[in-house]
Image: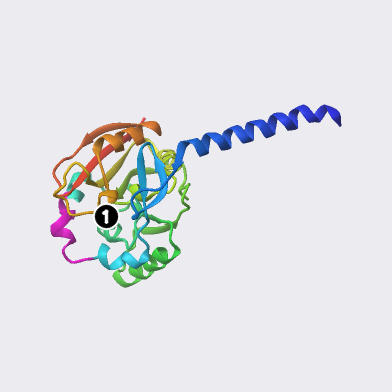
Amino acid sequence: MHTLKPYILLFAFLSLSLFSLGQDRYKIRTGDPNGINKWYMGRQIAQVMSHYGIDWLEREEREMEENTSLLLKNLAVKPGMVIADIGAGSGYHSALLSKMVGTGKVFAVDVEPEMIAYLNERIKQEKLSRIVPVLSTEQKLSLPENSVDMMLLVDVYHEFSYPYEMALSMRAALKQGGKLVLVEFRSEDSAVPIKTIHKMSEAQAIKEFKAAGFRFDKNIDNLPWQHCMVFIKQ
């Protein structure tokens, strides 16, 4: 029995080391009251918009403010594509994308059971046949590896409690050469009427996604308030 002791000690040491590395990735300190007390790569993580924000997501003026039609053109969706709308919320973008994928599908991914319930009801009412609601966790997508052609994240990544882990999970679910399109309100522009903590800069986004193994491709700079940054799984 004594021969097992060194291996048990080694396992305990490695487990503690990995835990410490995970803890070192994030810093715990106060900041903007609209954020949580958790920071990643110098950025404070914002509070999550819950299902209580559905009315804001579905507001009539959203098309005018964000030019969703132009965003969809930026995506260059092709029939048959498999697209994952990460942080789909009410399904605002998922519903539009489902009409563009033809025989493909749209995974509408969210962490809130209430949002998934709302999505299921929306699918029934609007007869949306190409949407598949997916309940995820804060650290991992519930999607098969190498299964998705494109991921769309609209004003949601900055709220991820575990951005590094989620970026790795998204990368795993993308096919080789697949695209991740990150849409975030521009922090470089003080005229954008959104709270600072709910904005991101291009430089910050590139830094974070590069750390998870993505390659920055381009920023399609044609939306009124938001970056439209394209990252590639390499």
Q: Was residue 66 drawn as part of the magenta stretch in this picture?
A: yes
| Mark 1 crowd level (few <14, some 14–19, many ≥20, 10 Å Cα) | many
Q: How is the image coloured?
A: rainbow
Residue 165 as seen in the image, left or right of residue 35: right
Which part of the image, by quadrant, shows the C terminus? top left
Residue at point 74% right, 29% down? 7
The answer to whether residue 60 shows anywhere in this view is yes
User: In the structure shown, which secondary structural element does the residue marked by tag 1 occupy?
Assistant: helix
Q: Going by the picture, which residue comes out furthest to the front?
A: 30
Q: On screen, 214 above or below 65? A: above
**Dominant secondary structure of the residues highlighted in magenta in the image:** helix
Q: Was residue 93 drawn as part of the magenta stretch in this picture?
A: no
Residue 191 as seen in the image, left or right of residue 56: left
Residue 183 coordinates in the image, percent (x, y): 25, 46
Residue 125 as seen in the image, left or right of residue 143: left
Residue at image mark 1: 97
Magenta residue span:
59-70
Residue at point 31% right, 65% down? 53
Which part of the image, by quadrant, shows the N terminus? top right
Depth order, front residue of 35/76: 35
Q: Going by the picture, which residue comes out furthest to the right?
A: 1
Residue 158 coordinates in the image, percent (x, y): 33, 47
Residue 48 coordinates in the image, percent (x, y): 37, 56
Residue 232 coordinates in the image, percent (x, y): 32, 34
Which kind of residue does numbered mark 1 sit on?
Leu
Rendering quarter of residue 203: top left
Q: On screen, 168 above or below 57? A: above
Count how many numbered circles sit on residues in the image: 1
Q: On screen, 90 above or below 45? A: below
The answer to whether residue 233 shows anywhere in this view is no
